[in-house]
């Protein structure tokens, strides 16, 4: 598909391209959500403990985290369509492997490979959006991505429950195969080509990146899971030492794998910090709320799922509005307003009382979702537009890395808070989440003092 770097794709080619991107992104997000719901069933069928079965989720998340930036860098070199299509192919084949797995180690191994495929999709999907839409409509394209993620997150548990009601758990992965094949065919026909560059790929940096981010996750999770302090400190020391060498190496690169060149742009760095803090706040809420609803308020598992749904559904409505507004107004202002609304929503949830009704919870959750939706699309647009066009892959990879870093930190903080204060843990998590959301709002508003750089 021919590409005009300034005008993107013409319609209707633009619509077909965004449908392909949305389809791949839906597969990656859904697969994370449906695996969580199926864990007890999988553990029983493969004769694994509940604790061991967590690797079905962790293996997927870990492989995504360590490979996002290397694959984004590869996209800058060989083209985003190649990385995206390759990710789709790996994801589809690995989905078949998951469906055929007969033991937990086989399933975990297939999930690792599936995570690498998902990273191929996630690492360059926003970079592809930048090549599809003209600059004046970039916010709308980014908003579609945010809306797709929200919808997939909202319907994921329902999809998993529906499949498990009529079939065994391997079908949760098998249904990806025909959809993945259709998406691959669509990618070859609809996605645009972008020129890469001939610089040699930095394999040493890719290995150091995997070590630093992988070990960082284990270090953050360590205290929450009762690891001895000396092991946590040794892991932290290894992260610092290797991370120092890694960053020094990146400073010498013209197009570094870790985009330190982009982090030197103040508005890009502030957007990354805003993203990390906001996704940390989101994860503090998402992980702790089921415990609050079921253990404290006495709602059932089904009722809990329904009560959480207003958050992602509010994003579905807020994201398109925020995307359109971000083409006209500052991301610093829109993000600041949205994150203030999120802060208010989390405070309202933390102070809802001991005997709330479903409506009392639902509208508070909708406030949180509306605030998060108002922040997300403008923030993502700002990160993309602050980077030079030839570094769109690095910006896209950093966008995903910031999200995963915030989510990992949030989940680790939940486990730590639950360990310290098991009785009041859920409410305390919401209060800490509100503090992170408020910090994110402050960082977002700092962008109003920076020049709104529009990269070529």
Image (cartoon, helix red, strand yellow):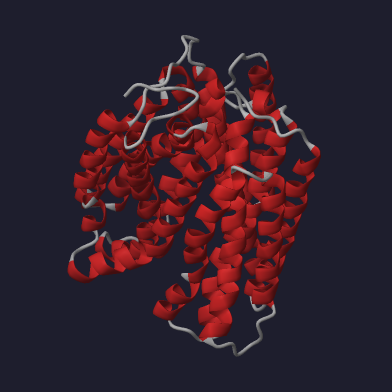
Of residues 294 and 222, the one nearer the viewer is 294
Q: Is residue 371 visible?
A: yes
Question: x and y percent of residue 396 in the render?
Answer: 52, 34
146 displayed left or right of 156: right
Quadrant showing the N terminus: top left
Of residues 315 and 110, the one nearer the viewer is 315
Question: x and y percent of residue 427 in the render?
Answer: 66, 74
Q: Identify the residue shown where x is 62% and y is 14%.
A: 253
Q: Is residue 271 above or below residue 227?
A: above
Quadrant showing the C terminus: top right
Question: x and y percent of residue 405 in the render?
Answer: 59, 45
Q: Is residue 73 above or below residue 357?
A: above
Q: Is residue 434 above or below residue 358?
A: above
Question: x and y percent of residue 274 in the render?
Answer: 68, 47
373 displayed left or right of 435: left
The image quarter in which residue 74 lies: top left
Residue lying farthest to the right in this orientation: 449
283 displayed left or right of 20: right
Of residues 381 and 134, the one nearer the viewer is 134
413 displayed left or right of 168: right
Q: Is residue 179 above or below residue 244?
A: below
Of residues 25 and 456, the one nearer the viewer is 456
The image quarter in which residue 192 lies: top left
Q: Is residue 415 visible?
A: no
Q: Identify the residue shown where x is 64% and y is 75%.
A: 349
């Amino acid at each position: 598909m021919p590409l005009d770097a300034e005008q993107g794709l013409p319609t209707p080619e633009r619509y077909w391209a965004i449908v392909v991107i949305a389809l791949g992104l839906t597969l990656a997000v859904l697969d994370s959500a449906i695996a969580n719901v199926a864990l007890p069933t999988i553990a029983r069928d493969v004769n694994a403990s509940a604790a061991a079965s967590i690797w079905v989720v962790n293996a997927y998340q870990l492989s995504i985290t360590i490979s996002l930036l290397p694959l984004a860098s590869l996209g800058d070199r060989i083209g985003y369509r190649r990385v995206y299509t390759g990710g789709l192919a790996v994801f589809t084949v690995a989905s078949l492997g998951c469906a055929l797995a007969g033991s937990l180690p086989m399933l975990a191994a297939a999930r690792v490979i599936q995570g690498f495929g998902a990273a191929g999709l996630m690492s360059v999907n926003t970079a592809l959006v930048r090549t599809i839409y003209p600059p004046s409509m970039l916010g709308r394209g980014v908003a579609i991505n945010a809306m797709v993620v929200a919808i997939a997150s909202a319907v994921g548990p329902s999809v998993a429950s529906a499949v498990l009601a009529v079939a065994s758990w391997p079908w949760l992965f098998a249904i990806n195969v025909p959809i993945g094949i259709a998406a691959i065919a669509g990618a070859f026909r609809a996605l645009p080509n972008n020129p890469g560059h001939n610089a040699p790929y930095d394999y040493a940096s890719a290995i150091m990146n995997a070590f630093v981010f992988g070990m960082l996750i284990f270090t953050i999770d360590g205290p929450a899971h009762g690891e001895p302090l000396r092991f946590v400190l040794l892991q932290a020391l290894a992260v610092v030492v290797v991370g120092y060498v890694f960053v020094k190496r990146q400073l010498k690169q013209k197009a570094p794998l870790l985009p330190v060149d982009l982090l030197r742009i103040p508005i890009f760095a502030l957007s990354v910090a805003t993203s990390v803090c906001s996704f940390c706040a989101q994860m503090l809420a998402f992980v702790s709320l089921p415990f609050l609803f079921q253990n404290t308020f006495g709602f059932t598992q089904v009722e809990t799922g329904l009560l959480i749904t207003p958050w992602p559904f509010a994003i579905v409505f807020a994201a398109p509005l925020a995307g359109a507004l971000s083409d006209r107004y500052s991301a610093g202002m829109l993000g600041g307003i949205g994150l203030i609304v999120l802060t208010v929503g989390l405070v309202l949830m933390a102070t809802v009382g001991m005997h709330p009704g479903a409506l009392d919870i639902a509208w508070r959750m909708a406030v949180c979702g509306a605030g998060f939706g108002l922040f997300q699309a403008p923030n993502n647009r700002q990160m993309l537009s602050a980077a030079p066009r030839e570094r769109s892959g690095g910006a896209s990879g950093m966008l995903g890395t910031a999200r995963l870093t915030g989510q990992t930190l949030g989940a680790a903080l939940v486990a730590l808070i639950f360990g310290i204060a098991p009785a009041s843990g859920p409410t305390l998590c919401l209060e800490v989440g509100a503090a992170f959301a408020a910090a994110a709002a402050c960082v977002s508003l700092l962008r109003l003092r920076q020049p709104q750089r529009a990269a070529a």
